[in-house]
Image: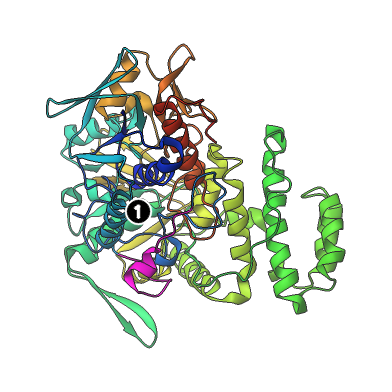
């Protein structure tokens, strides 16, 4: 008889449990395995996707793009066990954006289904508890639970997913400043974990960040306070309740993430990635990424919109592959092959739309932003611009090669991981109603101790905006050194794990936990978005996309089963 413990029962832990159950018959035979799954939150959903969240908060992926089940596209050694996508489970349109409590119930269904499908030799034990300690035993591991119980197992997998963190030095300074002057401050975090009630109604509030966290907080501070949207003449309008703050939002780019597309490709570009490889020198990385995305973009343009190009793809492709990105040869090729300026890919302009622009006042910037949002919504709804979606597929293909490059991850989030289009339409309506004001690119927020206010300035407009409330409208960056997870924090203090770029360090491809001295533990493993090699598999798996998460969990499940059975260890990938 053997035993393993899986710490964390969100989507990552759920997939691992499903893969253990799916592979057990082949690798264990008649041996009995106890699988202990530890999480104080609902099994399947975990903390981030727990049921007790406002219905106003949505999943940011379409229901048709969410699955926790393998399919024939997944390249893994274990058996494929298909199951419904969220859209199929709900019986809804693939483009539906589900409220998070609904998604929570789907994840719990998936977990329960995996357990029910387990062979008779696998016994899954659920512990609605927190793992607070981990220690070596002779031939095994001891997991201490907050309720006082201890589990003795052969191996442990840390799969806690996104963890809470202690305040960064900057956040601590902001909080102390707020305390001294009686100001309102909301730190980084998931919207459902924060208290937006501290933000006063009717007063200016600075929001630092314009990504998905901002969109969630925007919803809670407007619709969540009694405001409502109406449609007049096809355009969305906001009817204020009077309980909203006046949000001034700024960020590095100065614009929100692009909206999700409302259509699909007939087929993604073939053979990606082509130009980005692990051996690309860091100085050439951005050019290689740009060429990769341009390849995907132009492949779609030339094959799906042939009338908008002068030559065929078969003639364009070899010349494109030879040319250096950004060089004269490349520019000349694109110019003579794609007649319309609007059909050419201008990646730098897309990445930094406000770069070099200057407005006389916030109102002028606001008018530009209204047009920018309208154009983005129109483009993301029109299949005539399917080359944009092909580029997003290109970004997704690169995640397995560049999972932890901060610049690339920011680019991916901005282009491919944006909010549902209806949320951007609401943002535009809120701006027209005067509830949201845009500050522009390069926004900086400074503390003024003499006046007892925060002051925001940007590179886009002159002057400054003062406020007595500040919202850090972004998620915390991974930081193992500041993790609030008691198990991870304890391991780090004792030197039994270490941080690499903020992430929990593991030995790849086996995913064994690495200690401060660089040694990999034979019985401790970790996977998920907060681990080395994990960001490339973060987010929900899309059906038919050979999701990296499933490849990782299948390989680790087989390693665990081989170790438990006393067989030769198989490498995890």
Q: Which residues are magenta?
A: 80-98
**How far across and down, in percent of the image, does residue 52 sit?**
18, 54
Pointer 1 residue: 214
**What is the quadrant of residue 419 in the picture?**
bottom left
**How far across and down, in percent of the image, does residue 163 sit?**
32, 36
Asked whether the viewer can see residue 187, the reply is: no
Give the colour scheme shown: rainbow
Tell me how many marks there are: 1
The image shows residue 217, relative to residue 149, as above or below, that is below
Q: Nearer the viewer, residue 64 or 85?
A: 85
Q: Residue at x 72, y 38 (%)?
A: 284
Q: Residue at x 61, y 64 (%)?
A: 388
Helix, strand or loop under label 1:
helix
Q: Main secondary structure of the magenta part?
A: loop
Q: Pick the quarter of the image with the N terminus.
A: top left
**How far across and down, in percent of the image, does residue 502 sit?**
43, 29
Asked whether the viewer can see residue 49, the reply is: yes
Q: Nearer the viewer, residue 337 or 516?
A: 516
Q: Residue furthest left?
A: 147
Q: Residue furthest front?
A: 30
Q: Nearer the viewer, residue 379 or 181?
A: 379
The image shows residue 264, relative to residue 445, as above or below, that is below
Q: Pick the quarter of the image with the C terminus.
A: top right
The answer to whether 117 appears left or right of 525 in the picture is left
Q: Residue furthest bottom?
A: 233
**What is the quadrant of residue 168 in the picture?**
top left
The image shows residue 262, relative to residue 518, as above or below, that is below
């Amino acid at each position: 008889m053997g035993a393993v413990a899986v710490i964390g029962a969100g989507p990552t832990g759920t997939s691992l449990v499903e893969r253990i159950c799916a592979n057990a018959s082949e690798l264990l035979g008649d041996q009995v395995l106890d699988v202990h799954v530890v999480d104080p939150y609902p099994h399947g959903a975990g903390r981030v996707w727990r049921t007790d969240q406002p219905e106003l908060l949505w999943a940011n992926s379409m229901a048709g793009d969410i699955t926790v089940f393998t399919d024939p596209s997944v390249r893994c050694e274990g058996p494929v066990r298909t199951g419904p996508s969220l859209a199929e489970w709900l019986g809804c349109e693939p483009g539906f954006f589900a409220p998070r409590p609904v998604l929570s119930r789907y994840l719990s269904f998936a977990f329960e289904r995996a357990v029910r499908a387990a062979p008779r030799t696998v016994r899954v034990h659920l512990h609605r508890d927190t793992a607070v300690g981990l220690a070596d035993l002779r031939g095994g591991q001891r997991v201490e639970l907050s309720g006082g119980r201890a589990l003795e197992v052969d191996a442990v997998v840390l799969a806690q997913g996104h963890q809470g963190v202690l305040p960064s030095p900057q956040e601590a300074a902001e909080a102390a400043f707020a305390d001294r002057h009686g100001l309102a401050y909301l730190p980084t975090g998931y919207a459902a974990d924060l208290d937006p009630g501290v933000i006063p109604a009717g007063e200016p509030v600075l929001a630092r960040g314009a990504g998905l966290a901002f969109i969630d907080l925007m919803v809670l501070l407007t619709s969540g306070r009694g405001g409502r949207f109406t449609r007049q003449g096809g355009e969305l309008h906001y009817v204020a309740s009077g309980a909203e703050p006046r949000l001034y939002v700024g960020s590095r780019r100065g614009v929100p993430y692009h909206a999700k597309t409302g259509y699909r490709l007939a087929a993604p570009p073939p053979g990606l990635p082509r130009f980005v490889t692990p051996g690309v020198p860091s100085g050439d990385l951005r050019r290689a990424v740009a060429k990769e995305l341009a390849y995907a973009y132009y492949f779609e343009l030339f094959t799906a919109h042939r009338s908008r190009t002068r030559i065929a793809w078969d003639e364009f492709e070899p010349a494109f592959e030879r040319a250096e990105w950004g060089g004269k040869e490349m520019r000349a090729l694109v110019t003579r092959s794609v007649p319309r300026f609007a059909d050419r890919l201008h990646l730098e302009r897309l990445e930094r739309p406000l770069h070099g622009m200057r407005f006389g006042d916030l109102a002028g910037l606001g008018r530009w932003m209204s047009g920018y949002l309208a154009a983005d919504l129109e483009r993301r709804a029109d299949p005539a611009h399917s080359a944009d979606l092909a580029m997003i597929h290109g970004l997704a293909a690169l995640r397995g090669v560049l999972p932890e490059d901060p610049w690339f991850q920011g680019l991916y989030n901005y282009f491919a991981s944006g909010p549902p289009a209806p949320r951007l339409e609401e943002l535009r309506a809120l701006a027209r109603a005067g509830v949201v004001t845009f500050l522009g690119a390069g926004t900086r927020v400074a503390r003024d101790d003499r006046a007892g206010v925060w002051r925001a300035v940007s590179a886009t407009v002159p002057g400054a905006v003062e406020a007595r409330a500040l919202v850090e409208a972004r998620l915390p960056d991974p930081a193992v050194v500041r993790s609030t997870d008691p198990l991870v924090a304890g391991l780090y203090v004792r030197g039994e794990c270490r941080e690499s770029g903020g992430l929990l360090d593991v030995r790849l491809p086996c995913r064994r936990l690495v200690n401060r001295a660089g040694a990999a533990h034979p019985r401790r493993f970790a996977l998920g978005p907060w681990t080395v090699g994990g960001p490339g598999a973060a987010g929900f798996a899309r059906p038919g996309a050979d999701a990296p998460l499933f490849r990782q969990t299948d390989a680790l499940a087989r390693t665990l089963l081989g170790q438990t059975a006393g067989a030769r260890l198989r490498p995890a990938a």
